[in-house]
Amino acid sequence: DVKVTQSSRYLVKRTGEKVFLECVQDMDHENMFWYRQDPGLGLRLIYFSYDVKMKEKGDIPEGYSVSREKKERFSLILESASTNQTSMYLCASSFGGNGGSYEQYFGPGTRLTVT
Amino acid sequence: SQQGEEDPQALSIQEGENATMNCSYKTSINNLQWYRQNSGRGLVHLILIRSNEREKHSGRLRVTLDTSKKSSSLLITASRAADTASYFCATGGATSYDKVIFGPGTSLSVIP
């Protein structure tokens, strides 16, 4: 079974702190994604990566950065956490290559609260 | 930019009944996917249907795709309390570099 793990289920941080969210997948997937999910807004893509050291901005990249030094690991960084970044953060991975997009496998999510 | 829109936003049915959710989208797609999310958890992929397919089955799930109307439906037959969850459609582009765009979801409650 594909497994996508996220470093924390719940996280509480203070405004202005630098926050790291880690995601690891064990299926040798090329693509990895970070979403945030807010009530009424659905899933919004923050960043995705289709290869090591590659990254692409999603729909809401402001205030976030990412790092992918190894194929299995994709990190989301909140440079200076703000209260409007309180949300559920979901990591996902999928196969890459030609032939269209593939099903994504999600981690359990990290519920981040910024106070 | 939101691509898929599910309808209805919320649905409540009795156990044993069928549940139908619809998804409409705006631009051409390569495939359409359905996902389920149990409360407070990550999403689980249910089924992927490609733009050249019209219908696909998986267990109690049936998905249809009408590219001329830019719409899809998810039918869950003989629903169970365990089917209570949010269901999302997601549209995929022509390459794996294209973003998969999720709709806002349908919240399904199955009453025992």
Image (spheres, rainbow, N blue to C red):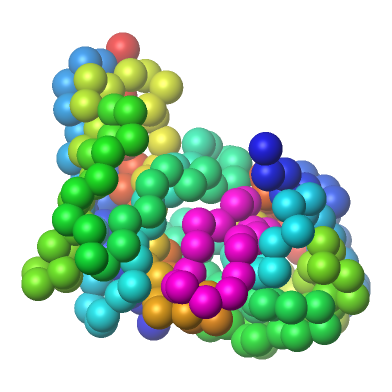
Q: Which quarter of the figure has residue A19?
A: bottom right
In percent of width and height, residue A28 lies at: 75, 59
Q: Relative to residue A85, is residue B33 drawn left or right?
A: left
Q: Residue furthest left?
A: B68
Magenta stretch: give its range.
A91-106
With A36 as the anchor, is B16 left or right in this view? left
Residue A59: percent from the left, percent from the top? Answer: 53, 82
Residue A6 painted magenta? no
Q: In which quarter of the image is residue B56?
A: top left
Drawn side of residue B71 relative to residue A59, left or right: left
Asked whether residue A81 appears in the rendered view, the answer is no
Q: In which quarter of the image is the C terminus of chain B?
A: top left
Residue drawn at (40%, 79%) of the image: B94
Q: In which quarter of the image is the N terminus of chain B?
A: bottom left
Task: Name above or below for residue B109 compared with residue A51.
Answer: above
- The residue under the point 61% across, 61% down is A94
Judge whether residue B36 can be spotted in this image. yes
Could you tell me which residue is drawn at 43 percent across and 48 percent down?
B35
Q: Where is residue A71 in the image (x, y as percent from the top left)?
A: 82, 68
